[in-house]
Image (spheres, rainbow, N blue to C red):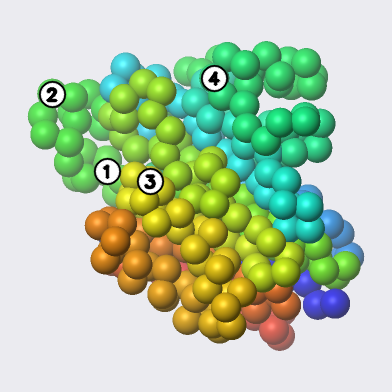
Amino acid sequence: MKPSLIVHGGAWNIPDVALEDCRNGCRHALDVGWAILSKGGAALDAVEAAIVLLEDDPTFDAGIGSHLNLDGKIELDAIVMDGATLKAGAVAAVERIRNPIRLARSVLESSEHMMLVGAGAEQFAREQGFTLCDPEQLVLDRERMAWQRCREDQHAVEFHVDHAMGTVGAVAMDSHGNLFAGTSTGGTCCKHAGRVGDSPLIGCGCYADAEAGGVSCTGLGEAIMRIVMAKTAVEFLRAGKSPQAAAEASTRLLLARGRGTGGLILLDKDGAPGFAFNTARMAFGYVAPDGSFIVAP
Ligand code: ASP
């Protein structure tokens, strides 16, 4: 079976000056993921490697460079889902995990549960041999300044110096037909402490069913949750829509019923990609059938 890979770095009003960073990030994520898949490696490894790269890239709102919450702290969310078993591993509101997608994978593989949050998730991380980091290592001056300005003034995109959103995600199918999807985020700026958005919620920010397809979403979490967007997109695929039609129907519904903006990437059960967004732009990339990388915006 031919492997397939699609990644994203967030759907929002990406300004011209941020385009190059967004494209480079997506290209590098495809590089690391495709290096695994093209050699016969596992979809789960490819999803993890692509998302780790995007978490480590300060361009995006995940891992290093995440937005701060109202209290000036970082709280990170991530999920990865196995399309064969329908088991997910998710973590939410973790503060001392450098790469939350790695911990999500550990929940997937080593826990009877599907989601762990806050202190309990960090306790699990310690039990699994993770080294907890100092949360300050994940905070950039850029984000501290944006947080200060957002608190003192009306929350505004321009305070974020070309970096207002940027959740990351990946969906991969390997040569054995295994399908995995994952999403990682720092959430929205100045969110209330304890706020969890769509990203780590099964069916909302991520879903994978090998019988239909895999999806990773980005955008206003509260709107995506209203329409359970990732599962909705998978059901569009199951009902026979093409990957592109399923993605576009999902963003239309996000606007009409979710009353919000965002986007999504997906692969159908045969690995064919689809993507859509109702924001000005979305950072994303996928591997074309001839092996070349298509990267946007
Ligand atoms: N969906 C994310 C959240 O609401 C944010 C984003 O995708 O930019 O936490």
In which quarter of the view is residue 37 placed?
Answer: bottom right
Mark 1: few, some, or many residues within 10 Å (few <14, many ≥20)? Answer: some
Pointer 3 with pointer 1, Cβ within 8 A: no
Report which residue position mark 3 lands on.
221
Looking at the rendered image, the disc whose residue lies closer to the viewer, 4 or 2, is 4
186 relative to 130 in the view: left or right? left
Task: Name the residue: 38% across, 29% down.
Answer: 195
| First along the sequence among labels 4 and 2 | 4
Image mark for residue 118: 4
| First along the sequence among labels 3 and 1 | 1
The answer as to whether callout 4 falls within 8 Å of ligand 1 is no
Cα distance between the residues tagged 1 and 4: 29 Å
Residue found farthest to the left? 153
Cα distance between the residues tagged 4 and 2: 28 Å
Report which residue position mark 2 lands on.
152
SS under mark 4: helix
| First along the sequence among labels 2 and 3 | 2
Cα distance between the residues tagged 2 and 3: 24 Å
| First along the sequence among labels 4 and 3 | 4
Pointer 4 with pointer 2, Cβ within 8 A: no
Q: What amino acid is labelled 1 in the image?
A: Val
Q: What amino acid is labelled 4 in the image?
A: Gly
